Structures are given as C-alpha cells and as structure tokens.
Image (cartoon, rainbow, N blue to C red):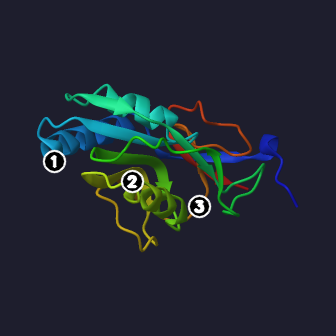
C-alpha cells in the first residue's frame, strides 16, 4: 500500500550545520588525495544534486562535471527496485581521474554499476564519494560523509515520491 506523503512525520537526523561541516571535511580530504590534479566529477542524479553543488564550491582544483542518472526507487517506494538509466554516462572519461558522487550507499548496486561502466572506459583512477553510508552496507567508498543506521531518509537532495529534496537537513521518515 503506497504511503501518503502528507501523512509523513520527520525526525531530524543531521542538521544543516552538521551537513555543512561534513561536506567541508570531505572537500579537504578529496583535495589532499588529488593534490591539484584535475578531476572529472560524475554525480548520480537526482539525489546527489544538492550535495554535489555544495561540495564543488569547496574543492580548490580544476574539474569537469559529467552527470549521469540511475534510479531504483519509483514513486513512493521505500526500498530499491530494478536499476534503470535515466541519463547515460558520458564516454569521455578514459585517462581521467574520476570521482563518482552519490547521495546514499545502501546495497551498493547503483554505485557498483556506475563504477563498472566507468572502469570500462579505462580512466586513470575511479574513486567514490558518498554523503550517507548505511552501517549495514558491505561496499566500501573512498570518501564517506556520515554513517547512518536503518530508516528511510529525506532532505538535502534525498526524496520520498519526489518530495522533501529541498529540506536543508536530513530527516528519518517516521510513520
């Protein structure tokens, strides 16, 4: 039975201030890793849009941005379904240092698929940066903003049935 977005209660998990500090820390670690090399950022839309826009303004290096879209959540689903490309990867990543950016790492299927497709282009390197990583996730990421427990989260780009992306904080959906 679909959940009515109007009946949702939210509990703040990460405040806007906590997120800002975490994004700054990620930018510092990314800059230290690449040491001035130009990077190709590949944000996975749509969830990583807000995170990516804040992150790139803190990165003190040359970069290009190539977005892609891959979705496994449909309508009011709270669990992943079949992965579908909504916007394909560019085919110009060979020889570049690539940083894939995503909003949340749950099962790892989305991030794994994008990284595999990029690896086929023979980049100089492929690293991953994820704002939220589930404590239960077995997949590793190179740069992790926050580790979180179970619960469906919204805000700061993450949505439920297309809603709540504009919240400046991250909240757990409570029913």
Q: Is residue 51 left or right of residue 73?
A: left
- Which disc is residue 151 wearing? 3
Q: In this view, does 46 lie to the left or right of 1?
A: left
Q: Which residue is drawn at 35% across and 67% down?
A: 140
Dot 2: few (<14), some (14–19), or many (≥20) neighbours within 10 Å? Answer: some
* Image x and y of residue 117, in percent: 47, 57
- Name above or below for residue 150 compared with residue 16: below
Answer with mark 2 or mark 1, whichever residue precedes in sequence: 1
Answer with mark 1 or mark 3, whichever residue precedes in sequence: 1
Is disc 1 placed on a helix, strand or loop? helix
| Cα–Cα gap, marks 2 and 3 | 35 Å
- Residue at the extreme right of the image, as rendered: 1
Residue in the foreground of this view, choosing between 34 and 123 = 123
Q: In which quarter of the image is the N terminus?
A: bottom right
Image-quadrant location for residue 72: bottom right
* Image x and y of residue 174, in percent: 67, 54
- Asked whether disc 2 touches disc 1, contact meaning CB atoms under 8 Å apart, the reply is no
User: Label 1: which residue?
Assistant: 33
User: Label 2: which residue?
Assistant: 121
* Image x and y of residue 155, in percent: 56, 39
Image-quadrant location for residue 92: top left
* Image x and y of residue 80, in percent: 66, 62
Answer with mark 2 or mark 3, whichever residue precedes in sequence: 2
């Amino acid at each position: 039975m679909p959940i009515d977005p109007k009946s949702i209660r939210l509990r703040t998990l990460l405040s806007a201030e906590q997120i800002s500090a975490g994004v700054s820390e990620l930018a510092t670690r990314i800059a230290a890793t690449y040491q001035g090399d130009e990077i190709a950022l590949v944000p996975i839309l749509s969830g990583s849009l807000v995170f990516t826009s804040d992150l790139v303004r803190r990165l003190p290096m040359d970069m290009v941005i190539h977005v892609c879209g891959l979705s496994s959540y449909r309508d009011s689903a709270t669990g992943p379904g079949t992965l579908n490309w909504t916007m394909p990867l560019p085919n110009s990543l060979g020889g570049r240092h690539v940083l894939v950016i995503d909003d949340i790492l749950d099962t790892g299927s989305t991030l794994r698929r994008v990284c595999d497709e990029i690896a086929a282009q023979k980049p100089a390197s492929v690293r991953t940066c994820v704002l939220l990583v589930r404590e239960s996730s077995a997949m590793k990421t190179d740069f992790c903003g926050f580790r979180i427990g179970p619960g469906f989260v919204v805000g700061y780009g993450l949505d439920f049935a297309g809603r709540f992306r504009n919240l400046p904080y991250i909240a757990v959906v409570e029913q």
